[in-house]
Structure formats: structure tokens, C-alpha cells
Image (tube, grey):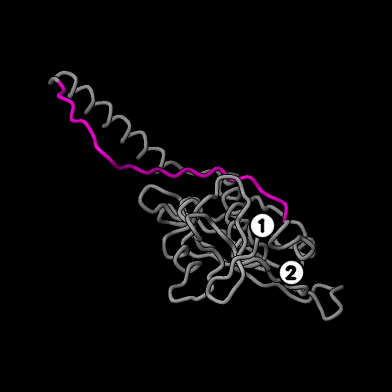
Amino acid sequence: MKKRMYATLFAAALVLSGCGAEERQAAVSSTSSGGDYAVAVVSAPAAEATAESAETMSTAKTEEANRLLTEEEILVAYDRAITAYEWFDLNPLPCGGPVVKEGGAGYQRVQYAGFDTLDDLKTYLGSLFSQEVIDSLFPENTAAPRYRDIDGELYVRPGGREADPKKSSASAAVEQQADGSYRINVTVDLLDEDQLAVIGVECYAFPYQNINGRWVFTDFELVY
């Protein structure tokens, strides 16, 4: 099975965290509805045509959700998941402007295309992770969460950690499971005290499953 080699994790330790970090573009969509609505009277033939169209679209979506994914698609999704998960630990979203105090911590306005509110961020995360993983990124009863809305705008508590210097390059391989789901098997090289020689490996497995028509990671963490 094909493997993709990731750049050494030392490079990740050099990436700027929080404010001023290089922006990565993300396509995010969110919808809202409300207000008055009109009721249209549809003739029987038109209603039948609408029903057939809806059924065709539903069938197409089902077929798309049930098709076999390519290894490339899954590894691309894994790359995106790493980037998004880093926003909560290693490399928070870029920000700027005045510091606002909330919950005893300082926050700054997120400056990242498409992420104007907390709902925008959560919507994007929903394209990558299961609800359980998303909930773990937003723990309840936390006075100073990483992200929060302030006056209707998305703010971040800046400052991330450095990557583990005792971990080197990582490789990822896709494994299909008997139930039709997938698993990303990741192996990370461990370095000695001088960070010169590989003395062992650390292994991780991340399930990638179809939940309600969406392919998402149902368990995730950073490996460095």
C-alpha cells in the first residue's frame, strides 16, 4: 500500500503560532434562515416531477457516500484534519487588532478568510471530524476556551506550543476495514536525547468513517 511521507516535524516547530501565522485558505459554508415564507400551490404533475427530482438527488448522494474512496482522497482529508486540529494546540488561527479580556484571558479577532463567527469554524470542522471529536475541542465549563465569539465575531486566545523535538518524520498509510470504513495508520520516528538518531517508533490509528453521509475522522489527535 502506498505511503505518504510527511516533512520532518522539526519544521513544524519553526512555524509561527497564533497572531501573524501564515494563513491557509479554507472553504467554509454556513446557512441561515428565518423570517416570513410563502406557500406555493403546485399542480400534481409539477409535484410529481419535483418528487422524482428529489429522489434522483437523494439516490445520487447515497451512491456518492457509499462509493469507495481513493487513497489520495483519504490522505488529503488527513492533511486537512491535521491543519485544523493544529488550530487548537500547535498553531492557532492568525489574529490581530486590540486585545480583549474575557474569562481572565486575552483574545484577538481571528483574521482568516471565511471564519467570521464560531459557527463558521464549527461548520468547517464538521466536514472533517465527528461531533464527538468537535466536542472535545470545545470543552464545557472552560473559562478561557481557545475560540469564542465576542460581540458576534470570532476571537482566538493566541499562543501555541512547539512540536515535540524528540519526534522526527512521520509516515501515513491507508487501510480499508471489513465494514467499508478506513483507517489511517501513522508511524512516527522517535529520536534520542541528542535528536540525532532514531531509537524507536510511535504508532497511531485514526478511523475514517461514513457518519450520516459524511466521511469524517471519529478519533483524532496530533502525533507531534
> Seen in the image, is 214 located left or right of residue 115?
left
User: Quick one: label 2, few (<14), some, or many (20+) residues within 10 Å?
Assistant: some
Does the segment drawn in magenta span residue 41? yes
The residue singled out by tag 1 in the image is 97
Q: Main secondary structure of the magenta part?
A: loop
Q: Position of residue 195 (x, y in %)?
A: 84, 74
Q: Residue furthest left?
A: 44
Q: Is residue 124 above or below residue 223?
A: above
- Tell me if 203 is positioned left or right of 120 in this view: right
Residue that label 2 marks: 189
Let me know if residue 114 is in the magenta part.
no
The answer to which of 97 and 173 lies nearer the viewer is 97
Which x, y percent locates residue 196? 87, 73
The residue located at (44%, 66%) in the rendering is: 135
Query: Residue 224's quadrant in the figure?
Result: bottom right
Q: Is residue 196 above or below residue 45?
A: below
Q: At 60% across and 55% down in the image, what residue appears?
A: 110
Q: Secondary structure at mark 2?
A: strand
Specify whether 46 is left or right of 72: left
Earlier residue among tags 2 and 1: 1
Q: Amino acid at mark 1?
A: Gly
Foreground of the two, 212 or 125 = 125
Residue at 27 percent of width and 31 percent of height: 54
Residues shaded magenta: 21-42
The quadrant in which residue 26 appears is: top right
Tell me how far mark 2 sits from mark 1, CA to CA: 39 Å
**Crowd tier of the residue under label 1, counting other residues whose Cα lies within 10 Å: few below 14, some 14–19, many 20 or above:** few
For marks 2 and 1, give the one nearer the viewer: 1
| Place of residue 14 in the rendered image (x, y in percent of width and height, measured from the top left) | 79, 63
**Which of the pair 121/136 is nearer the observer?**
121
